[in-house]
Structure formats: C-alpha cells, structure tokens
Image: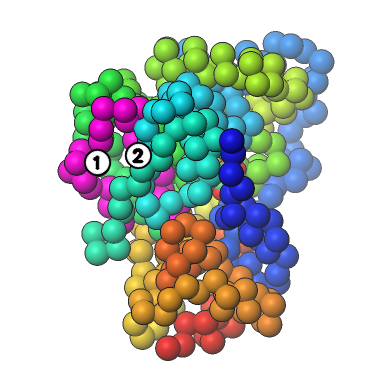
Amino acid sequence: MFGRTRYIAWATQFYGKVPYDLATSGVPYATWAELGLPTPDVDDPAAFAALRGAIARYNDVSPAEVVPALGTSQAIFLAYAALLSPGAELLVGAPGYEPLTRAAEGLGATVRAFDRRADEGYRVVPERVAAAIGPRTRAIVVTSLHNPTGVRVDDDAVRELAAIAAARGAYVLVDEVYAPFDDLPEDGVFRGSARKLAPNVVAVSSLTKCYGLGMYRVGWVLGPEEVVERAEAAAVATFGHAPLAHASYGSAVLGAVGPLAARAKALLAGKRALAERWVASLPNARWSAPQGGLFGLVTLPGRGDLLASIEARAREAGVLVGAGTFFGAPESFRLSWATCDAARFSEGLRLLEPLVSP
Ligand SMILES: Cc1ncc(COP(=O)(O)O)c(C=O)c1O
C-alpha cells in the first residue's frame, strides 16, 4: 500500500501561497498565449506517436527507448513497476525526495538509503553504494541535480554505479528532472541524459521544472528495450493510455523548449550568486554549493528540527523555504530562487533573518 507522502502534503499547504516563496522548485508557469503556438489538433491519434518522437528528439535518444508519462511522478511509478516486484530492494540516496521512497514501498519493495554526505559535498560515493548493494537489489536511485541540495552527479559516478548494478543484474535509475538546468538547451535538445551513459541506466524526467510547463504533465521514462516493454505493460494495466489531448499538447509544447530555455535562463540569472553571498554572510551556516539549478541546501548545525521555525516565518513574515525535515535533513532548509525576481528574493532573504540567527 502507498503511505502518505508528507512532503507533498506540506508543500500543497504552503507553496505558492506566500508573498516570498523561496521554496518552490520550478520556474514560473508559462501561459499558452506566451508560447505563441498554433492550437494543436486534439482529435488525431497520430499525436501519440508524435509525442514519443518529440520526447526522443528532445532527449537525443531513439523513440524505442521512450515511454511517455504524466510528469516525472508517473514516470517514477512506471519505471519502478518495470524494475521492482514485491520483496525486491531499492537503494536510494539520502537526503532525498520522498516520493522516490513512497512509490517503491507502495509497490512492495524494501527501500534502503545510502548517504550523500555534507562533508563530501553531497557527492554520490560509488564505494558506499557498492557496500550497501545486496542480492535482492534491483535498482540504485539517484537524483541529479540532487533534490534537495542541487548537486550534480557526475557522469563517471553514474557509470560506476551502472557497473556496480550490472554485476547484480540490476539498474541505475536517474531522476534527471532538474538536470537541464546545468545548460538549458536553447536549441531545444537536451544532450545530457544519463540514459546514454550505460545500457542499464534508466532515466526519468519531464518538462515541469525547467520550462514553466508544470501543468502539461509531459514526462517520460527512457530505458533499454526490456524496461520499456514492462513500463508500457504497467501503463496499459493501470491507466490504459493518457488522454489524446496530453499527447497533442505535449508534442506541441516540446517544440517550444528552445525559447522556454532562454526564458528560464533570464528568470534565474544572477540569483544563485545572491543566495551564495547571503549564506556566506551567515555565522555557522553550511551551503551545499550547487554549481547550477534553482535551489541549494542551507544547514544550521546544532539547531535541531527547523520545521516549526520555518512555518512560523511563513505565517509571520510571508516568507517560505523548503523544510529539510521532509528530505531527511531536519537541520536544513532548501532555498530556491525559482519564482521571485532578484529584488523580491533579496527581500525574502532579509525576512529569513530570525530563522537563521543563532
Ligand atoms: C526529484 C523530483 N522528481 C520528480 C518530481 C516530480 O516532477 P513532476 O512534476 O514532473 O511530476 C519532483 C518534484 O518536485 C522532484 O523534485
């Protein structure tokens, strides 16, 4: 059975509902009018194949490696359904994004964590994963950029994980929903998918975070043939197929990724540096020091669980950060510069002072 995902329940309650939202993890929504696209034909079933083709082109892989999904969330479910059966084991990086755990548990798998440690810059350390892997491990899961720290998993580490997994007949699942932030593709092609790094790497992603297309739910699984086949079987068994309008609009909006990448770059410009300078000015705070993206993790060692103080700041000053509690890092918060412009972001940082003062 699927347990409640506490993080999403909390995010639904607070995110986007305060004047200084330093918590939300995607660039602001782009409206249909802003995209300037012709209205797609929503009656033509050829849109299903067109969507698969457009996802393949965007990711620079072959259509045979693609299973379209409703956002990264459903892509995670379909990938897990393809990789796991009851009693299987999954290794997932901690701290981490809670649905990656809940979805696997719901499918009857056992979830074990491996640490991504602050004193190692939240890198994935393959030796630690190798020490944790067991005979029932079916998949090693990483997010890159890492939620909540924003730290990238480098390609060599993914290849090492893939070799560790391959020795057990297992897979590496990379949730790369934030990966394009490293180099937002103004030509509309994301060339950095981890899928291309080794045969047993499965990637999940969507257009929701980088391009302001959260409401279109255009997501996918990229995997080898046997994973694609099983993920498609899971899709057919659980929802038949997605609405035709999802495919029609999905393939249309994939054609607007280039300009949306440029839009995202402009919206984010300069704010990571503001965040970095602010954290550096705080006594006793640690920073995950992401090299790109739209959030990083601030840790206040010795302060205990920050959740109540974070909620108090939201209520009293209208400023919200992402509570590390829900990522397994209670002395931390995720600081995002996705939605506020630079002036509002700076004011939000100022309003956080009572939270960060020793
Ligand atoms: C690591 C990670 N994966 C997946 C998702 C869900 O993405 P989507 O909105 O495309 O379902 C999120 C959303 O916050 C996320 O942080």
Magenta span includes 130: yes
| Snapshot quadrant of residue 119 | bottom left
Q: Are marks 1 and 2 in contact (CB under 8 Å)?
A: yes
Instruction: Please give left or right for residue 179 compared with residue 198 in the image.
Output: right
Separation of disc 1 and disc 2 at Cα? Answer: 8 Å
Magenta span includes 167: no
Residue 25, above or below 32: below
| Snapshot quadrant of residue 71 | top right
Residue annotated with mark 1: 132
Relative depth, front residue between 71 and 51: 71
Residue annotated with mark 2: 91
| x 45%, y 39%: residue | 175
Residue 211 seen by the camera? no
Disc 2 is placed on an element classified as strand
Image coords of residue 292 (percent x, y): 41, 55
Which of the four quarters of the rendered structure image does ligand 1 lie in? top right
Relative depth, front residue between 172 and 131: 131
Q: Which residues are magenta?
A: 122-148
Disc 1 is placed on an element classified as helix
| x 52%, y 42%: residue | 102
